[in-house]
Amino acid sequence: MKKVLFFLFATLANVALLAQQDLSTHFMRHTWQAHRTNPALYPDYGVSIGLPGVYNSLWIENLTYNTLFTTDANGQQVIDINSSIAALEGQNRIREQLDLETLSLGLRLGPVGLSFAHAFRFNAYLDYPKALPQLIWQGNAQFIGQEVSFGPQTDIYAYQEFAVGAMVDLAKWVQVGGRVKFLSGAGSVSTANSGLRLRTDDEIYALTLDADFRLNTAASINYNGFDDVRANFDFASFSLDQLTTGNNGFAFDIGARIDLGKLDLSASLLDIGQITWDEDVSNYSLNGVYEYEGLDLAQGIFEDSTSFGSVLDTLKQIYEVKETQESYEMALPRRMYLSATLQLRENWTVGGLFYSERYRGQTFTAAALSTNLQVLSMLNVGALFAYRDRRFDNLGLNATFKLGPVQLMAATDNILTVFQPKDSNSSSLRIGLNLLFNRIDPPATDAGPKWF
């Protein structure tokens, strides 16, 4: 039983550990990367080429390095399981997003803009109750006479994204844009149902498991019994040799921008779509109420001292994991950006942003204030302060350096992680390289309505 439960954590360990919100990039309007947050945003260049870049964001709720590790008598760093579990709340989440952007292109043809892009995208999401690690590492003796729920919800998936978009000037001060994305799935592990409840009788120590659990997988899991569960998901296996698979889907983005002189308004909806997993699919279900008695087995199911081989033999007789090969659908996290920027001086802007993400029936929100300053003709720097994850200690920094047509950009939404990495539970970083040609002069000051 311990091995079966631990498998859910081991799956994450086999990948890179879904997602913090990408906030800073939206305000870097002079970069091609800002276009990813709103298809109506184009830099003031006729040709924009995005070279390989990366974006990564990780958030581990309620845990930090200093929570997980302690120093033993020999001065060695060791994992402190009990302290880590004590730091958890009733429900806890881990999210990660990793985007590898290979190549993209933007063209401005008068009032029309066209875009093409390709990227590898990986997301991981785990929402688990505190009772799950308690059962795995501390046993069920603490729950005698109780019924506890320990089923996790998880999504781990990766796919390639091919995007084609367009932008049009409806007026000199109004732009609208859209983007259609073909998705080619590489692998997935996803819980459809996560009902797992365990009761330990307080008199005869009988165990009762009430299960309504279903795990959907595609090209990710090999299950050959309780004693043979292997994860074969490897993000590093992505290659251009396999541009398409049998796991396909579509999504689209829409956005708009209104230029009111010194005030600029922007709104966008992103990743409205889903992937259907049809190829190399397996579904593992555990349904029904399972009961077993016997003091030795009941006391030892979650104990290290029990011979695991004998426990597995018993579990095989009691639990019947049903395996099927049915396709399934998975919706992408749907994101929304609403923002306003104000030009205080020719080289200085400030802005505000509201972000919302809808995923697996939950809504994640964030709000941010930003400022960007063109220090030199080749150097732009910015800062961001955000409220998210019920925390105010989110300070971001960003910078771009441009020499000729070459533009290098870097941004993070939480610079404090650099200075106190062992006490932080989140991190984010974006690095990009662009080639920008044929600068387009901004419209005359009387091009549209001026409110400021």
Image (cartoon, rainbow, N blue to C red):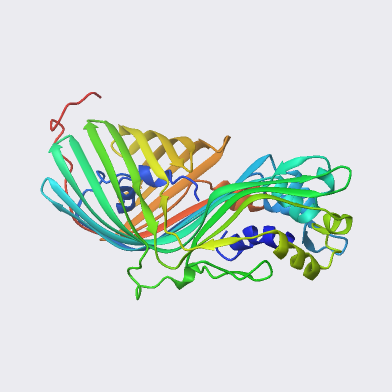
Q: Is residue 389 left or right of residue 165?
A: right
Q: Outermost residue toward the top? A: 451
Q: Nearer the viewer, residue 6 or 106?
A: 6
Q: Outermost residue toward the bottom? A: 241
Q: Is residue 295 left or right of residue 427?
A: right
Q: Is residue 440 left or right of residue 67?
A: left
- Residue 412: x percent and y percent? 48, 50
Q: Nearer the viewer, residue 373 or 190?
A: 190
Residue 348 visible within the image: yes
- Residue 414: x percent and y percent? 53, 46
Q: Residue at x 79, y 67 (%)?
A: 308
Q: Residue at x 55, y 52 (%)?
A: 154
Q: For the C terminus, which image quadrant?
A: top left
- Residue 435: x percent and y percent? 27, 61
Classify residue 402 by image quadrant: bottom left
Q: Is residue 385 above or below residue 45?
A: above
Q: For the N terminus, which image quadrant?
A: bottom right
Q: Residue at x 78, y 50 (%)?
A: 207
Q: Is residue 337 above or below residue 328?
A: above
Q: Is residue 116 above or below residue 85?
A: below
- Residue 98: x percent and y percent? 46, 58
